[in-house]
Image: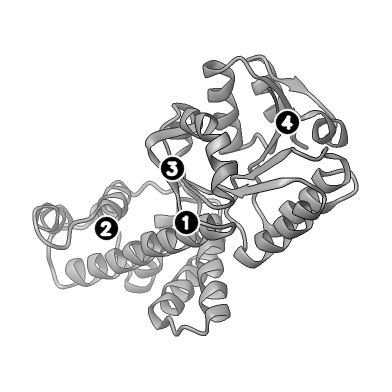
Amino acid sequence: MIIGFIGVGTMGGPICSNLLRQTDHDIRVFDLNDEAVARVEALGATRSGLAELCAAADVILTSLPAVSIVEKIALGEDGVLGNAKPGTTYIDLSTTSVSSTRAIAAKLAAAGIDMLDAPISTSADQAGRGEMAMMVGGDPEVFERHRELFHTMGDPDKVFYVGGIGNGLVVKIVNNYLAQAYTAAASEAFAVGVSAGIDAQVLHNAISQSSGNSMMYQVLANRALAGRYDDPDFTLDLGYKDAQLFLELSDDLKIPTPIGSDVHTQMRFALGGDRGKLDHTVVMRVYEDLLGIDISQHEG
């Protein structure tokens, strides 16, 4: 089939590259970044204009950084609504607003276009190897029609169908909030432990074998001990956006989330230091700056 892929940057590029290696689909791509397009062109993708891509594709995939951009692509005259034919399936891989996604899906449905929201939880390297976790929301029959495509993009054991449109985003936003909350708590724990005179490596070794250990603790600790935040797996800007989406969702539901508000504030302190393009674990620097310590150099 013809697949249109819009947004082939940090995450979209590896996903598109994996599809090019693993399938024989005719994949046409659009991105404002010429270098990003050139990288997937070299693997066999065809560069296309936006309107032309949307008109030709059987399936349209988007991987985009912001709600406003998704809305423009999905509903604009040059985008999906203005050009895709009835029967087309639009799959948004972005992490955006639940309410916006449901509104987009309703408008597309009126034009005979199906939509699935399928945010991903992975690193760029895992995306390139087809090892992504994916949370998919939308009509179950539409999901089943494209199950093989999802199993090519992601790890089949980590592709989760989670219900109606927008539900994929709910699961992703809650998951990412937990990841940021663990990171914030680990930062506080390290700051208190080393300030009390514990060698940073000794503290890490003990926590790693105790009840405080977790996947996100290990990510934070390894970054802090190395003092390396400038080669991000997931940037602070993106983490902050996801924390904001969690607060917006909880506000829509009128559910109090005081811990979420504190996590969001801690991330805002880090952003105030112009660190948005660094790894999200750079929230540790808030405490290092405040206390005048460097975890990577701290010995008890």
Label 3 or label 1, whichever lies nearer to me, is 1
| Residue 242 located left or right of residue 256 | right
Q: Amino acid at mark 2?
A: Ile
Q: Position of residue 122 (x, y in %)?
A: 43, 42
Residue 122, numbered circle: 3
Residue 172, numbered circle: 1
Spatial separation of the CA atoms under disc 1 and disc 4? 26 Å
Residue sitting nearer the eye, 82 or 266? 82
Colour scheme used in the picture?
A: one colour
Is 29 situated above or below 100? above
On the image, numbered disc 2 is attached to which residue? 295
Residue sitting nearer the eye, 80 or 285? 80
Disc 1 is placed on an element classified as helix
Q: Position of residue 218 (x, y in %)?
A: 25, 51
Q: Amino acid at mark 4?
A: Asp
Q: Amino acid at mark 1?
A: Lys
| Residue 135 located left or right of residue 105 | left
